[in-house]
Image: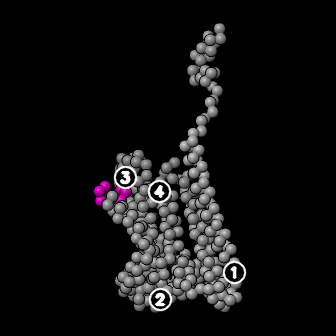
Amino acid sequence: MTTSTTAQQQQDDPAQPPKATQQATPAVRRLGDTIFSGTALGAGVVILLVLAAVAIFLVAQSLPGISNEDNSILRDRTFLEYVVPLAFGTVWASLIALVIAAPIAIGIALFISHYAPRRFAAVLGYVIDLLAAVPSVVFGLWGAVTLAGFVQPFYAWLNANLGWFPLFSGQASATGNTILTASLVLSVMILPIMTAICREVFLQAPRLHEEAALALGATRWEMIRMAVLPFARGGMVSAAMLALGRALGETMAVTMVLSASGVISLELLTSTNPTPIPANIALAFPEAHGNGVNTLIATGLVLFVVTFLVNAIARAIVNRRAEFSGAN
């Protein structure tokens, strides 16, 4: 009687499993899963500990350097008067480099992903990736020895014809060692990382969206504008912010092109240029002593905070744009 009742219930509701199979069996946790989860957790904790250790070190070592008493770096200035021009130079040079590199990187990535023949695209992508392996000191030598002299006549032409514009005003440098030259070097340095990320994001655009746009009569550029770029917007922002973070922390290339001046100026072609924080630390550290070393560490703390804020803003932008992405 019970058997027929159970069979009748299953016939009435085929989706309901027999009562004997409704009891969930506990999952067996394997040794490999335990080791992997523990390793992943440990790696995350190590990253947080390293970040906290760096922050604690910077804060602890920076406090003595804020005072200008017996300070070989500050002398008669306050710490704020000393660090504000350096922070301005850091952000200014990095933004110029990003403005120069971003459209070039996006164009190269689109060419590799949607225009170039596959064999040529593979070779070009490999060459672009190789730029990331070039040491920064090599870029610095190239910028100081070759690029500065090459672009100096162009700077003179800009100053003579567009000197009414604030960015190109002032007396043009006779050597070409200007903030614009340093930004050009930085733009070449950040080009590989931004191109590589944008290329991978463009290749992940939904193929069906692209084919649908082409089937409706769109040109290749219209297809890219409607199907690829909206999908890749968050990835492009992430690539730009990673490139900006690389430019903010670059030391040797800028140091070899610029001399420390510690001024706030928007002029791009003059020999008196704002100095980024990393370049200033590299130039001033050999002669610093006493509290002067702590002052340089304090400027490093400012750079740490600026970089952290840039990445936080980038993450907020990416999260804000995620719901509008073509991936959804």
The kind of secondary structure element at disc 4 is helix
Amino acid type assigned to the residue bearing label 3 in the image: Ala
Looking at the image, is mark 4 or mark 2 nearer the viewer? 2
The label shown at residue 232 is 4
Q: Are marks 4 and 2 in contact (CB under 8 Å)?
A: no
> 10 Å neighbourhood of mark 4: few (<14), some, or many (≥20)?
many
Looking at the image, is mark 4 or mark 3 nearer the viewer? 4
The label shown at residue 234 is none
The kind of secondary structure element at disc 2 is loop
Residue at 35%, 62% in the rendered image: 126
Q: Residue 234: x, y in percent? A: 51, 58
> 10 Å neighbourhood of mark 1: few (<14), some, or many (≥20)?
some
Query: For the stretch drawn in magenta, what is the main secondary structure?
Result: helix
Q: Which residues are magenta?
A: 112-121
Q: Residue 105: x, y in percent? A: 41, 66
Amino acid type assigned to the residue bearing label 4 in the image: Ala
Amino acid type assigned to the residue bearing label 1 in the image: Pro
Q: Nearer the viewer, residue 191 or 37?
A: 37
Q: Residue 78: x, y in percent? A: 67, 86
Per the image, the residue denoted by label 1 is 64
Q: Earlier in the sequence, mark 1 or mark 2?
A: 1
Per the image, the residue denoted by label 3 is 218
Looking at the image, is mark 1 or mark 2 nearer the viewer? 1
Q: Are marks 3 and 2 in contact (CB under 8 Å)?
A: no
Q: Is residue 104 above or below residue 292?
A: above
Q: Nearer the viewer, residue 238 or 44?
A: 44
Per the image, the residue denoted by label 2 is 271
Residue at 62%, 82% in the rendered image: 293
